[in-house]
Amino acid sequence: MTVRTLTLDGEPVSAREDETILDLCREHGVPLPTLCHLEGLSAVGACRLCLVEVKGSPRLQPACTLRAEEGMEITTSSDRLRRYRRQLVELLLAERSHVCAVCVANGRCELQEVAAAVGVDHVRYPYRHPVTALDASHPRFVLDQGRCILCTRCVRVCDEIEGAHTWDVAGRGAGARVVSDLASPWGRSDSCTACGKCVQVCPTGALFEQLQPAGGGVKRREFLTFRTRAREQGPWGR
Amino acid sequence: MNAEGLQELAEREGARRGALRHRVSVCSAAGCLSLGAGRTREALTRAVADAGLGGEVEVHGTGCLGLCHAGPLVQVASRQPDGQVDRCLYERVDAARAARLVRQHLQGGAPLAEGRVPLDDPFFARQHKVVLQGSGDSDPERIESCLAAGAYQALLHALTRLRPADVVAEITASGLRGRGGGGYPAGLKWSTVQKAAGPRKVVICNADEGDPGAFMDRSVLEGDPHRVLEGMAIAGYAVGADQGYVYVRGEHPLALTRLRTALEQAERLQLLGHRILGTGFDFRVDLRIGAGAYVCGEETALLASVEGRRGTPRPRPPYPAVSGLWGLPTLINNVETLANVPTVIRDGGRRFAELGTAGSRGTKVFALAGQIARTGLIEVPMGTPLREIVFDIGGGIPGGKAFKAAQTGGPSGGCIPAQHLDLPVDYESLIQVGSFMGSGGLIVMDESACMVDLAAFYMEFCRDESCGQCVPCRAGTAQMHALLQKLTHLEATEADLAQLEELAGLLQATSLCGLGQGAPNPVISTLRHFRGEYLAHVRERRCPAGVCRPAAPGAEPSAAAARGGAAPGAEAAS
């Protein structure tokens, strides 16, 4: 395997050919906000928060899908990038109904954390408050579309790890939403194994376990680390 | 079938035509059909039979004749005693006019005066047809008719005389650029796919045309499907692909039917499929039908859709030329690009490059729409001034009104105001004035159009057509549309205008694919050329064109504007 050298915010770093710029940032402790990315799942580059500048390229590139190339010069933070990240989080907060005080994920919410990290102290865009559905038909879990940021982690974990592919996205634009099976109630899903992985990977309070109080949602993601380690180190259980 | 067989079929059809005195071609493109061309054709066929002219007159359907506003159109090609062929074009041919046409022109030999369109009119004289050569002459539903006009000769030439590398070299020499909008050099794309390593390769024809007011690709497929299939086969030979897909929008049923017919006929004659024309080259073409998502015209979303997944784009690189359909190197070209290919191969790349401007070779097909006298389909050399397209060919603005702007490039494009009327229409010039070539939709607006309203229309389109995957496009277009709606309701402040511009910059820089990156372009372009109009909406609460009005009382204007997007819950209920 060939090793590449490149610069990350001016610092020379080395990378394996299968490493992304986001991997390098994590390795070198460079802070980079992400929402759709989750270690152990495929990368889609949809939230646009990890966009970085690549010298010589007119377009910004998402660090999560960008492979390290020899001689790349990456900038992860600039006035422009900081402004964009803030705007993107503001757009997310204004898009549906994110009311932290009554949310099960309050205090453990990645959207909250990212908002704080990129310096959102208020939202300048009008809150759109669309009418959204809440699916409480499942015996153990609830889906609140109003808190969904369409990161598609649930879709990917269900397809790639659990192998059930219960979740997918339906609709377009602002009307896009995650649906179970062919947009039937979750509780009636034939494919759902009730494993709860989708709930564990959800970055917000969109997917949560029933009967939890505000701020009571805890995300258990050990299974992902276990899977990742197993993939990297070879046979199971070593 | 081999080369001799192809020649023989073409000659037999030529001889059959030679024995006819009149060929009556009825425009059977979607536009004329919707105006009753089907009934016209029946009336003509019946009248010809009644007059006992069956042996010397042929009535057949053909591709778009261009003057779509004056349909149904009928062209009569008459063989004179000296062997010359005289052509007459008639407009608005209803059943009654059809009967008179048969009686006077076909039987009596004297062309009708009524409804006759002079063929020396600038509308025809200023055009130069490459892609639309076969439209209006051949019958797209009969391969023999197309073979007589030279279809598949370029493929035969490529397969028997040229190596794949020579074909790519001809395309490169021609300077042909992608006609889907981006203008990427076709030769470079072809050579990338040719050099890419893969167990198999694929050629895809992007026929997912969906810009509002654009009907170029649909017309080409309706009028001359064999030209596109031939272009695909040549591309397959050049890059080393044995499989092609045409990705057609399901909303183009006529184009689909004609393509299916063309495919069957070409396969039957071994012009597609195994051992094409008796050579060792295999190339199979299949149709994939899009469900009408605008974003599926974006190449990576198109690939996902062909693979049977939800049509959403993915970040590039890797580019489809390296890793496309199922990870195979994939050549994706637009309909019009591929329709140029047979001409490039037949005449040679250098000859093709003589037409057009230095950076933009060849011709461009435009769909003229909006406030223009002659709505229709035209093809002009690249670099033709906009004034010539709008006034000489398009007949200017109806009702004595003044030209205000032309919109090109659809929802990712921009406006060209009156002061740039003498602009040569080519890729670079359009970008210089803040517009974009796009796929060829050209919408003309007169003084009664409000540019803020126009920007709001395109933003609404992008908001509805966003795939919903990336945040700036999904949430940003909704916010921008809400702001534009505030403007058109004469409620916006200067802060709203500033926020609109800020969001425009965000979407351009951070969206995942061309849809979101291009969505702010109509706003940016109208702000550049018509900022005064925006300011009148804000400072004077007045729409200079008189289009925008305050929202109707009781409609909760601002709240409605804020809720402009389709509510997820509302959609779930439907």
Image (cartoon, coloured by chain):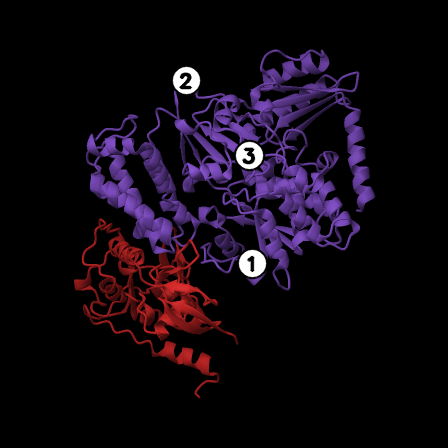
Chain colours: A red, B purple
In percent of width and height, residue B31 lies at 53, 30
Q: Chain of mark 2?
A: B
Instruction: Name above or below for residue A168 compared with residue B558.
Output: below
Query: What residue is at 44 percent from the left and 88 percent from the top?
Result: A238
The amino acid marked with disc number 1 is Leu
Pair 3/1: label in front: 3
Element marked by disc 3: loop
Pair 3/2: label in front: 3
- In the rendered structure, find residue B399 and report the number of the disc placed on it: 2
Structural crowding at the residue carrying mark 1, measured as other residues with C-alpha within 10 Å and reported as few (<14), some (14–19) or many (≥20): many
Q: Identify the mark nearer the N-term, 3 or 1.
A: 1
Q: Nearer the viewer, residue B161 or B296?
A: B161
Q: Is residue A174 visible?
A: no
The amino acid marked with disc number 2 is Gly
The amino acid marked with disc number 3 is Met
Q: Identify the mark nearer the N-term, 1 or 2.
A: 1
Contact, CB < 8 Å: mark 1 with mark 2?
no
Residue A198: quarter of image: bottom left
Residue carrying label 1: B325
Give the left or right position of residue B353, taking residue B424 as reference: right
In percent of width and height, residue A231 lies at 46, 79
Instruction: Name above or below for residue B158 compared with residue B395.
Output: below
Q: Chain of mark 3?
A: B
Give the left or right position of residue A113, taking residue B400 as reference: left
Give the left or right position of residue B523, taking residue B138 as reference: left
Query: What residue is at 43 percent from the left and 87 percent from the top?
Result: A237
In percent of width and height, residue B244 lies at 63, 52
Query: What residue is at 33 percent from the left and 60 percent from the top?
Result: A49
Residue A118: quarter of image: bottom left
